[in-house]
Amino acid sequence: MTDRSHDRLQDPPLSARLTENAVAMADALRRNPTMLFGLVVLTVMALLAFGAPYFGLPEPMRQSPIDRLQDPSAAHWFGTDMYGRDLLSRVLHGGQISLVVGLSVAAMATSVGLVIGLVAGFNRRVDAIVMRFMDALMSIPSILLAIALVALWGSSVQNVIIALTIPEVPRVVRLVRSVVLMLRDQTFVQAAIACGTSTTRILFRHIMPNTIPPLIVQATYICAQAVIFEAYLSFVGAGTPPEIPSWGNIMAEGRMFFFQNFGIIMYPGIFLAITVFAINTFGDGLRDSLDPRMKRRI
């Protein structure tokens, strides 16, 4: 019997694995109210942001100078900004940019870092070269590197995502590499090498599944940091273009009018804080659920 046919006999059906994972996630949420709270808050924020076009709100860029700097009212729940634009509409639409940037950066950084970390941790020659390059990237503050890259490439959502992804990749690489270094000398890996299993199959079949739990937790923190850094970049004028509403842009434009309508800065700041808090809370709960030592305490 070949190795491939043996794997087919041993692997459970996909539906059974999905059902088992769903049951495990439901049990983790039941046992860990912290993770459930973070997930619920994050879901509500996502529904508000991506459901904004369907709430019957004014267009976020529609100006009405006669209504400028109004206080909250029945017509404008959060008031208006210096151009008479509805603040509630702008804050909710701004959440789309922050969430898209955060999720995109987390997905791209973990995917690229996973592949590089697997190869670097398993191959000592590659490791000596790659990790020096990663150390050099980590020596540059993330926000400064992102500002420099956006200034070089131009201001757009895509460039912001790439500029925030690059500084996060070395952190993922170091995490994955540390797991690979612990596993590459284990008996099951050496047995796979002795059986003539290809390096690619060893990495993605035997080693990669062990890196997923810590990688998922790391992805939540990358997502939260990317949301904050996107607001930083937009606030200093190096992020998304001014015509695209984002929480950083809203606060940057309204800082000169804070005393006329403090909500221009307060409302996007509150939404930003709640979103980052929810992501970090979910990540903390996920870490506790995936850590075997913490599982026994929950």
Image (cartoon, rainbow, N blue to C red):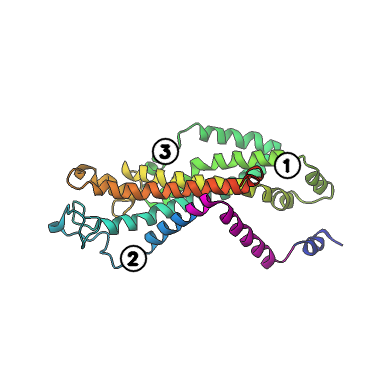
Which stretch did the figure color magenta?
A: 12-37
Task: Tell me whether the residue at label 1 lies in contact with that at label 3, contact meaning CB atoms closer than 8 angstroms.
Answer: no
Query: Which residue in the protein does label 3 denote?
Result: 143
The image shows residue 231 at horizontal and vertical percentages of 36, 45
Mark 2, residues whose alpha carbon is within 10 Å: few (<14), some, or many (≥20)?
some
- The disc at residue 183 is 1
- The disc at residue 53 is 2
Choose between 210 and 77: the one closer to the eye: 77
- Please, what is the three-letter code of the amino acid marked with disc 3? Ile
Choose between 41 and 117: the one closer to the eye: 41
**Residue 20 forms part of the magenta stretch:** yes
The image shows residue 293 at horizontal and vertical percentages of 66, 42
Query: Going 33% across and 57% down the picture, which residue do you hit?
Result: 92
Q: Can residue 153 be seen from the camera position used here?
A: no
Query: Going 60% across and 49% down the picture, which residue do you hit?
Result: 289
Dominant secondary structure of the residues highlighted in magenta in the image: helix
- Please, what is the three-letter code of the amino acid marked with disc 2? Pro
Q: Is residue 267 above or below residue 76?
A: above
The image shows residue 137 at horizontal and vertical percentages of 51, 35
**Residue 250 forms part of the magenta stretch:** no
Of label 1 and label 3, which has the lower sequence position? Answer: 3
Query: Going 70% across and 38% down the picture, which residue do you hit?
Result: 181
Choose between 149 and 69: the one closer to the eye: 69
Residue 49 image-quadrant placement:
bottom left
Instruction: Locate the N terminus by quadrant.
Output: bottom right
Q: Can residue 89 be seen from the camera position used here?
A: yes
